[in-house]
Image (cartoon, helix red, strand yellow):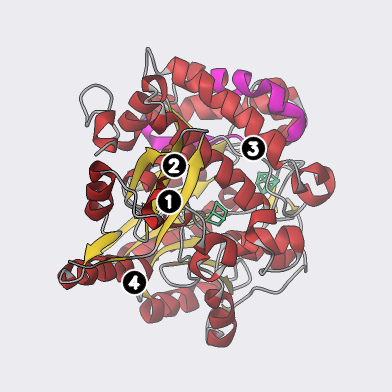
Amino acid sequence: MGEFLTPFRFRDIGEDTSLIVNEVGDFKLFDNGIVGRLFDEALTEDEHSRLRDMHILLQEESHWRITALASRAQNRVSKRSSKLSYMMIIPTLRCDLACTYCQVSRANENAKGFDMKPEHLDLLEKFWTDHAGPKIKIEFQGGEPTLRSDLVLEIMDRATRHFDQVEFAICTNLMNLTQEAKEVISDPRMHVSTSIDGSTTMMAANRTGTTERADRFFNNLRYILDAYGSAKVSALPTIPEDAYDQIEEIIDVYLELGFTSIFLRPVNYLGFARKNHASSLDSTDRWNRAYFRALERIMEINKTQFFEEFYSSMIFQKIISAGTTNYVDCRSPNRYFEDYCVVNFDGGIYPTDEARMLSRTRQVDLKIGELGGEVDLEKLSTLNFSAMNEVHPDCIHCAYGPFCGIDLVDDLSRYGRIDMPKHETAFCKRHLDLFDLLFTKIKERDRNWLDPLMSWAYRKDGSHAPFEVLYD
Ligand code: SF4
Ligand code: SF4
């Protein structure tokens, strides 16, 4: 009975093991040399059977298996939605801080002409009617959105009337908790997202300028945590290269504040960071070393308490769910204006927040429309053609392709082009090393890592699927 092969990808994990992944992200580990044995027709019975389980080796009459595989492959790349379900809105570009790595090149607190105008609000509702579905999550970004809490409240009110279901988030520096800002935050549908770069000294160095202002930030943060509990707030640090050796201290600050999650993030090479943190252009190797050291520390912490690192958790979930997790900064296809977009203070519409930032610094104009006007479908289509790793030569041969994502805007920001060979990009170096690390832990059945990763994936401490489900 004849057999044929379907496409598959492979990569050595250490010296003795090979990872085999099919086109839809099912994976298994084999003894090294499996690919040679496959083509030499020298597979063991067990290897043969495992490759058949993965639909990589198929018998000629099993066409239904091909159809099942093709259908899963098609689902992976088909359109997620024809309507927006997530939107960022920038009520103002003004900000009362001047962080060294500010990505949006914010405007001064008292500058004129950087706030949404009243006429934008009616146009925003029309835009919702034309492009959004019945449910939406609206995230208020800045600048500092609480400088225009009145506008935030007005948009919340209109959204509540417009949509069947709505959730809100506000990304705020928490410097000024005015009465209006407190009113915004008190809405039970509102989630607060803020930046904590570490201790008071670190906050003063990167964000607040003085320790007095850093103290004010921590007082305001404690006020919200006390009033609403830790579930109301998420926080993340932005870590410049000169703080890589203090990454453990940053983790300790989050623990002391009672957070159960941290998203360790290097400086993004955008906006003011291009000048003030120029080394962030090519510091990926150094970042990866610091990040992996931090993960070791976090796995130790998890021996006694639940404490998640968001990014490794998200990547691990992509591995165990065959890439189906939908995190917008690491997914493929990552078609723009499919399920989310950004509306700027001046009514400009952008495919992502980073695209807004690149346009603001005049590197490349990624604006795809304006409130009240048409969306530039030609520009979108040019971007979207390249917005899937399946069209990039390095990625189509990479074992991690089914789990990985694509970030054209990061490539544009760093290299000024979207067709950079992917293995030369910071995005690829960061992810390739992280996938290698996680698959090494899977190969080694390292419980110190796999138990926490599984508990993060299932979002609970205590009983959850054991890590053994990762194997056959
Ligand atoms: S990063 Fe945010 S808080 Fe800091 S200056 Fe920029 S807009 Fe303001
Ligand atoms: S970006 Fe790099 S790690 Fe990701 S799929 Fe492409 S080649 Fe692989």
Say which label, 4 or 2, has the lower sequence index.
Answer: 2
The reply to whether dot 3 and dot 2 touch (C-beta < 8 Å) is no
Q: Where is the N terminus found, in terms of image quarters?
A: bottom left
State whether residue 204 is above or below residue 41: above
Q: Residues within 10 Å of mark 3 (few under 14, many from 20)?
A: some
Look at the image and give the residue range highlighted in magenta.
231-252
Q: Residues within 10 Å of mark 4 (few under 14, many from 20)?
A: few
The reply to whether dot 3 and dot 1 touch (C-beta < 8 Å) is no
The amino acid sitting under disc 3 is: Thr
Predominant secondary structure in magenta? helix
The amino acid sitting under disc 4 is: Ser
Is label 3 within 8 A of ligand 1 (CB to nearest ligand atom)?
Answer: yes
Residue position for label 4? 81
Real-space Cα separation, disc 3 to disc 1, in angstroms: 42 Å
Say which label, 3 or 1, has the lower sequence index.
Answer: 1
The reply to whether dot 4 and dot 3 touch (C-beta < 8 Å) is no
The amino acid sitting under disc 1 is: Val
Residue 85 rendering spot, x and y as whole percentages: 37, 65
State whether residue 26 is above or below residue 341: above
Residue position for label 1? 35
- Locate residue 75 relative to residue 257 in the image: left or right: left
Q: Secondary structure at mark 2?
A: strand
Relative to the observer, which residue lies in front, 289 or 214? Answer: 289
Real-space Cα separation, disc 4 to disc 2, in angstroms: 36 Å
Asked if residue 332 lies in the magenta stretch, the reply is no
State whether residue 188 is above or below residue 294: below
The amino acid sitting under disc 2 is: Ser
Residue position for label 3? 238
Q: Residues within 10 Å of mark 2 (few under 14, many from 20)?
A: many
